[in-house]
C-alpha cells in the first residue's frame, strides 16, 4: 500500500439527510465541519426553494459556495496588495 493511502482517513457524514463516506487526508473534525457547512448551505437554499430536487439543490449550493470563495480570494488578494504597499512605504 502506498504511503499516501495509509494516511487517508475514512469518515461518514450526513448531508441533506443522506450519508456520505468521505476518504481523504484531512482530520475527521475538519471533514465534519466542511460537511456541516455544506449541509447548512443546502438547508438554507432548500428553505427558500422547497421544490428543488436534490441535484438542483446541490448545484445551487456549489454555485453559491464558489461565489463566496471567489469573493474571499479577491478580498485576500486585495489585502495582500495593501500589506505589500504598506511595507514598501515603511522602507
Image: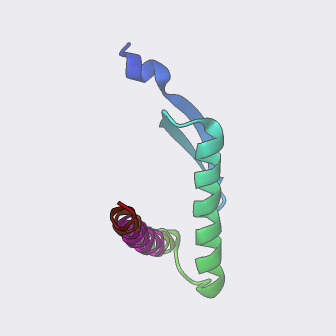
76 is within the stretch colored magenta: yes
Question: Which residue is most to the top?
Answer: 1
Examine the image and state in which quarter residue 69 appears. Answer: bottom left
For residue 34, above or below residue 51: above
- Image quarter (top left, top right, bottom left or bottom right) of the N terminus: top left
Q: Is residue 84 above or below residue 23?
A: below
Residue sitting at x 49%, y 36%: 23
- The picture quadrant where one finds residue 2 is top left
Counting from the top left corner in percent of width and height, residue 75 is at 43, 72
Q: Position of residue 52 (x, y in %)?
A: 53, 80
Residue 20 lies, in percent from the top left, at 56, 47
Query: In which quarter of the view is residue 10 placed?
Result: top right
Q: Which residues are magenta?
A: 62-82
The answer to whether residue 91 is magenta is: no
Residue at the limit of the structure toward the front, as seen here: 91
Viewer-proximal residue among 51 and 75: 75
Q: Residue at x 62, y 41 (%)?
A: 12
- Name which residue lies at 35% across and 68% down: 89
Question: Percent from the top left, x then y, of residue 5?
Answer: 42, 22
Looking at the rendered structure, the number of numbered marks drawn on it comes to 0
Quadrant location, the C terminus: bottom left
The kind of secondary structure the magenta stretch mainly shows is helix
Q: How is the image coloured?
A: rainbow
Amino acid at each position: 500500500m502506498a504511503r499516501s493511502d495509509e494516511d487517508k482517513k475514512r469518515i461518514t457524514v450526513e448531508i441533506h439527510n443522506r450519508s456520505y463516506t468521505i476518504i481523504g487526508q484531512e482530520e475527521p473534525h475538519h471533514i465534519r465541519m466542511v460537511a456541516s457547512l455544506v449541509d447548512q448551505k443546502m438547508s438554507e437554499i432548500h428553505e427558500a426553494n422547497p421544490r428543488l430536487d436534490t441535484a438542483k439543490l446541490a448545484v445551487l449550493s456549489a454555485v453559491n459556495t464558489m461565489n463566496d470563495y471567489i469573493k474571499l480570494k479577491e478580498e485576500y488578494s486585495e489585502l495582500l496588495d495593501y500589506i505589500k504597499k504598506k511595507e514598501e512605504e515603511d522602507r
